[in-house]
Amino acid sequence: MRRTLVCLALACLASPAAAQRTDTRLEVGATGTLRIDSQRGTIRIRGGAGRELHVLATHDARTRVDVRRAESGARIEVEQRSGAGVDFEIVVPRGWAVNVDGLQTSVTIEDTEGDVDVENVGGSIVVRGVRTARLETVHGSVQVSDVRGSVHAESVNQAIRISNVVGDVTAESVNGAVLLTGINAGAVDASSVNGRIEFTGSIADRGSYTFDTHQGDVIVNVPAATNADVSVATHNGSIEADFPVQVRGDVTRRGELRFQIGRGGAVLRAESFNGAIRIRRADGRTR
């Protein structure tokens, strides 16, 4: 009898934390927006064929997950009565927009081919295969790739990595590096306070490109056929260029140099307070 009572007591203690699943399928329209709010856990979203929204959520017994249609698409709301998180596996129709509002949540969005908007506090954000991306996190890293539209990315304490983008890019970190590769944009604005900035991509003849950091190096890798009016400035670092440099005007007290690559045209500005600035040819040649 005593053993039975002990077993029943242990079962009662364990039951509230036992994993449960909420499995929901909705027939939805070809276009729409999925909105999801979750305080903690993981969210993985991918694009799928057809017009079905499939939401699989793993959580404890004290958590309620509500999936319902909304005027503009669908909405997922979570009532988390304990400290446990919710792990989501979600499939949305390709082309749908996705809007995520998280707290301590790791977010991965792949191949949705729509617009993505993520705001987070304590988790990483990984996005690939979307149309446009607007991503903000405080304590997590940001990784973005394969985007055919604009990208806006912010992180306070981690690095930002953006690759294979055809569209304008804005990236800002306080305590992390900003690394941009395979960028084809008419406008790029990348900044960091305590991290390096590196850019590899094309320069449009009438484009605008700004790279600004306080405590890191700035490395800009551009094609040999680039046409740009360049302004570089560093207070306590060196300046190097793989292109012939003919200084235009006087060197200012801020350590600024102005010169032209090719015929000029694009505006390229790079500045660092305590770091080096390197303007390199992407083919690796020095002249």
Image (cartoon, helix red, strand yellow):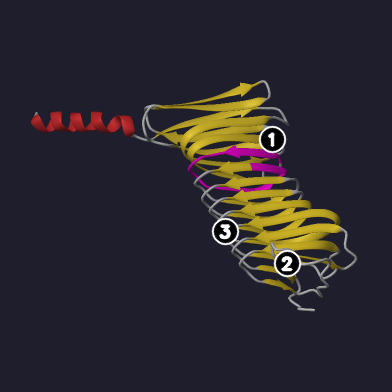
The numbered mark, 1 or 2, whose residue comes first in the sequence reads: 1
Residue 40's quadrant in the figure?
Answer: top left
**Residue placed under numbered mark 2 in the picture:** 221
User: Real-space Cα distance between discs 1 and 2?
Assistant: 35 Å
Disc 3 residue type? Gly
Q: Is residue 214 above or below residue 149?
A: below
Mark 2: which amino acid? Asn
- Residue 263 location, x and y as percent? 90, 65
Left or right placement of residue 121 versus residue 226 in this view: left
Q: Is residue 175 above or below residue 96?
A: below
**Residue bearing mark 3:** 195
Question: Vertical placement of 182 versus 104: above or below?
Answer: below
| The residue positioned farthest toward the top in the image shown | 71
* Figure disc tally: 3
Residue 282 image position (x, y, % from top left): 75, 70
Residue 123 as seen in the image, left or right of residue 189: left
For residue 129, side relative to residue 137 (left or right): right
First to last magenta residue range: 114-134
Q: Are marks 3 and 2 in contact (CB under 8 Å)?
A: no
Residue found 77% across the figure and 61% down from its top = 231
The residue under label 1 is which amino acid type?
Trp
